[in-house]
Image (cartoon, coloured by chain):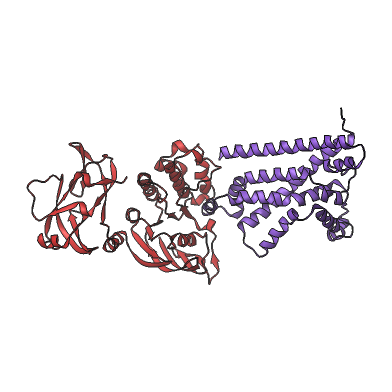
Chain colours: A red, B purple
Amino acid sequence: MELRITAQKKLNPFFLDVNFTIEGNRIGIFGPSGCGKSTLVSLIAGLTDPDRGRILIDGQPVFDCEEKVNIHAQHRRIGMVFQRPHLFPHMSVKANLLYGYKRCTKGQRKITLAHLVDVLQIGDLLHRGVNNLSGGEKQRVAIGRAVLSNPRMLIMDEPLSALDDSLKFQIIPFLQKSCEAFAIPYLFISHSLTEMRIMTERVLNMADGRITGQMTAGELARDAMVKSPFPYTNLLQLKGPRRIDGMFAYRFGDRELLISGSGRDEALYELSSTDIILFKRHPEAISARNLLKCRVGEIFEAGGRMGIGLLCGNEKLVAVVVKESVDDLEIREGVEIFAAIKATAFRELG
Amino acid sequence: MLAFSHSDYLAILLSLKVATVATILSLPFGFAVAYLMTYRKFRGRVLLDVLVNLPLTLPPVVIGYLLLLLLGKNGWIGMWVLQPLGIHIIFTWKAAVIATAVVGFPLMVRSIRTGMEAIDQRLIEASRTLGAGPLDTIVTVILPLSCRGLIAGSLLMFARGLGEFGATIIVAGNIPGVTQTIPLAIYEYVSSPSGDAMAIALCVVSVTISVAVLVFHEWLGRRMVKVD
């Protein structure tokens, strides 16, 4: 997907003025609340018109002020998942799901109800009214409704921000699965760095109605790390655990990580960069259950401390230490180093 | 024991007929005006708002007189539209329907607007992004979700229509068996020296119908809250 947008829109209390081109299938728009993210996606979806400008999706203009092109929202084929589910309260789950599907032409109907129900695991909800669903179920139906409209792209406008942490990480796999299974490119809007890192590959950074930069999700996290006093968090998507001594050993590149968690088949873990202890040589005896031999990939300033990029086989971790530790351990790029991590330092997100 | 005369029964039936027809005829216009005022921005919106709500503040007699001027033989509509088509409205039950519709219209529009304003804007946006055009959205989202406002507005207008007097007597007159509704019949009884008892009897009928309508309105409201 390619988005090429030049748009101005007078808003209260700021002026939205954006000019960018971005390519990718998992694009993020990141910025603080009230910076204009939702207005920008409203312009793309056709729910609001810019005062001036031009919006092209995959080279096709959907809005062009000079050429007087303005394709109405219902013809843009852009599915939307909002912050709250916004399901039609007078319809059943099935009727909600089929609302967009019925309005597609036969040629556009590539995603079927049966397949979608299978991916989102909502088969037992189909004949229920939407008012009796839990928050997570409602959001799954809202995702399904947008996906089943067979859109050319999906806009997810802070779809997780109204959910509590545990629910949020239950919904993320459904978001990922549905977009992957049906090959739908998406635009994901959030002010959460963690969500951005999980959901997107390229990110537009936004502030005060303007695009302030374009980067990968990894660069965004690094950028935040340099500017923020809060430590960097490593996000690890781990699979296929085996049980060892009441803990679970997950594959991590060509090694294993021992984690004291629920042992789910596929799980997302968070590991703070300050929970990794570095050793110059192999320590004799330590209580931490994970000792990884790594290579130092890079060293960088991180909020008054030093970030150490560790290469553990194909996998990467970031540890944060004080400057004195870098000198004492003679840490330089390319040297081998040992990283110790407690099995209890991992926080299961979902 | 009081016994209603034939013309009293006709007055009761005519009241119900006039209120029902006025409500049914006003419903699509009420919905359209409420929709325009809730969802559309256009020049003259304030003027439309004032015009729609004017009957709330004008004395009904004034409304009746203005309708008489408009629909009478020499009025704009009467002379240029009704007469060429051979339609005669003044001093018929149809005039009572028009008077009732004009007087009750703002109540209906206000209730429907309240219902529409309670609809989450995001639901409308969702329907648009799911491929529904404006008319499709009206039919599948706005109409069903403003149903409570529609019913409330209709019942209020119906109840108001049952009590309409001032405008009706001007444009429809007070002809027993033809244009005489309950309020007009009561007025006639009150004006005659020995009509108090019958006036009270008709008042009881009027109060009973109104209470029944309002109880139904409340019941429906509660039932719909439960469904929500």
The foreground one among B168 and A113 is: B168
- Give left or right: position of A94 versus B54: left
Q: Residue A341, how many percent across, how many down?
A: 18, 48
The residue lying furthest to the top in this view is B1
- Give left or right: position of B152 versus A29: right
Q: Residue B61, how many percent across, how many down?
A: 82, 53
- Give left or right: position of B35 versus B51: left
Q: Residue at x 70, y 49 (%)?
A: B107
The residue lying furthest to the right in this view is B193
Q: Is residue B177 visible?
A: no
Q: Residue at x 9, y 56 (%)?
A: A280
Quadrant placement of the C terminus of chain A: top left
Q: Residue at x 89, y 60 (%)?
A: B74
Q: Residue at x 80, y 47 (%)?
A: B97
Callout count: 0
Q: Residue A21, how many percent across, how many down?
A: 40, 67
B197 in relation to A51, above or below? above
Q: Residue B180, how many percent across, how many down?
A: 87, 43
B220 in relation to A235, above or below? above
A283 in relation to A72, above or below? above
Quadrant placement of the N terminus of chain A: bottom left
The foreground one among A214 and B184 is: B184
Rendering quarter of residue A189? bottom left
The residue lying furthest to the bottom in this view is A66
